[in-house]
Amino acid sequence: MSKQGIVMVATLVAAAGAGFAAYKYIYSGESNAGDLAGVIPADAYMAAYISNEPEAWEKLKKFGTPTAQNIITTQITEAQQRFLDQTKMDFSKDIQPWVGNTMMAILPSSDGRANKPQVLIAIGIKDKLKALDFANKLKAQSKDPVKKFDYKGIEITDTGKGSSETFTAIVNDRLVVAPEQKTIESAIDTAQGKPSLASKAGNDWFKADTLGLKQPIAAFYVPDYLTAVQEMLKSGKTPVTLDPATMTQLKKIQSFGGGIAIDDAGIRMKLVAKTDGTTLNLPTTSAKAVSSFPSDTFMVAGGTGLSQIWTEVNKIAAAQPTTQEGLNQMRQSFTQSTQLDLDKDIFGWMGGDYTLGMMPVSSGITAAAGFGGALTIDSTDRAVTDNTMTKLVDLAKTSGFSVDRRQVGSVQISDVKAPAGQGTLFSYGWLSDKSMLLAVGDGLVEKIAQPSGESLDRSPNYTTALSSMSAQKQSYAYIDLEKVLGLYTSKVGTVAGRTIPPDVNAILTSIQGLGVSSAQPDKNTSQVEILLTLKPATN
């Protein structure tokens, strides 16, 4: 084997995973994530999985322009060829036919050295003859000695020497690869009955519904989050020891995982954390305010409970003197410059839903940027909110700003205007007894306080990005990439004299938008879902 050893095998595996996305979608590996985890020892603290199932990748062909598809295919082909130049082998003939689904795991060092974690790769073999042919070709090109020996009835092959030494074995139709003999022996022991990552007590990451993704193309698993963090910190050149306060927070997360899948809307990712039940549990957001935003809103983010989040931040900071000192300094600076109390006058009343949206504008103080922003936020104490806004307006007046009041529909709006006719800095008013609107940008107040036309929540692009996610959202975000690119081209790119490179533009123009949401299905589970919506394929 070449001097790249374990790195070479890992790269081949990664290339195989990417190759199935752009090539023929042929054959089907028989080893799913749970099967591969069956040869991974139970003390593995991290594992990653790549699927080479043709059905999992097939839907990619439904999206993007021919130009974008050709760019991706070309880049993958060139990357594969650059790697294989030294081996004089062909990816599609020598590697793709036999490589099945793959798992790479990180384990503690076999000799107890804290700074030397071990890598173990398990590869499903779809075609034993092709795999043997590949191994023979690689062996023929190697100048390093090849040794073979038996361990519990399994033949282990030892190639290379020194830092490039690599051990391989065939275990239950899986190729296992590692840089240490003991790691391979541990995989064999696991396959023959010792506890595995898949059978570890309390580990349900390999159940089909844990991530909630249909046919994931890739996934990762951190079955013991605290151990994983500690091992990673110890493996660096300068080991890091966590302080007690940080340890307390990390212990709240018991395990962590995520995956990526391709579905009818685009590319979907889910991140799931299993906790001890003591993490902050925010109420769900109704997201009703989105119906007040117009369909030309190109970016929106919302959630609930800013006051609860602020309280939790302070609670965590109290156990960390440096962080606490920084927060105290921020409070003092804020009070000195605004005469407002950050805890009471700002975050104290922000316990309800909030929605922030960005929309195009063509006039006013933000015209040069081409967009403005509007925030709706539900107050839990209107009197305190009014007092806060009064103090802010009084502060603005001391700097030469003025305030005009007007009626927009049923809403009384206050416009805070810059001196010398420079335009309105911001506007605010009460949309209802508890919901306040703040806007920066001409015309945005009218769009929200007196809406006309289609609302954002009825936009097909918005609903595609978010409607398939959990209805019990704690927060959410949406970006219409098509509108953002249009704004960049017409405003930012023109002013800065910058254009998007053709290859990058071809990829970006194949993307419609991005949806993100967070939820807490139960007190022990937190999840984030991300959907990159793609445009249908064109001829």
Image: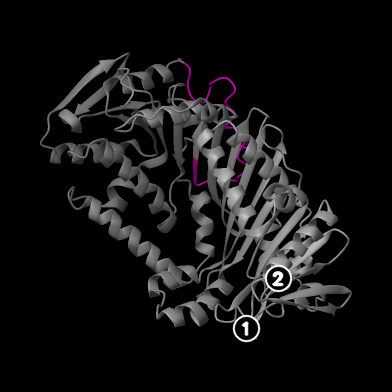
> Can residue 209 be found in the magenta stretch?
yes
**First along the sequence among labels 2 and 1:** 1
Residue nearest the observer in this picture, 340 or 416 = 340
Structural crowding at the residue carrying mark 1, measured as other residues with C-alpha within 10 Å and reported as few (<14), some (14–19) or many (≥20): few
Q: Is residue 196 visible?
A: yes
Indicate whether 524 appears above or below 79. above
| Residue behind mark 2 | 439
Indicate whether 315 appears above or below 331. above
Most prominent secondary structure in the magenta stretch? loop
Q: Residue at x 61, y 32 (%)?
A: 274
Marks 2 and 1 sit apart, C-alpha to C-alpha, by 16 Å
Indicate whether 539 appears above or below 31. below
Indicate whether 292 appears above or below 96. below
Direction from residue 58 to residue 297 in the image, left or right = right
Magenta span: 195-219
User: Residue 203: x and y, percent?
Assistant: 57, 26
Name the amino acid type tagged 1: Gln
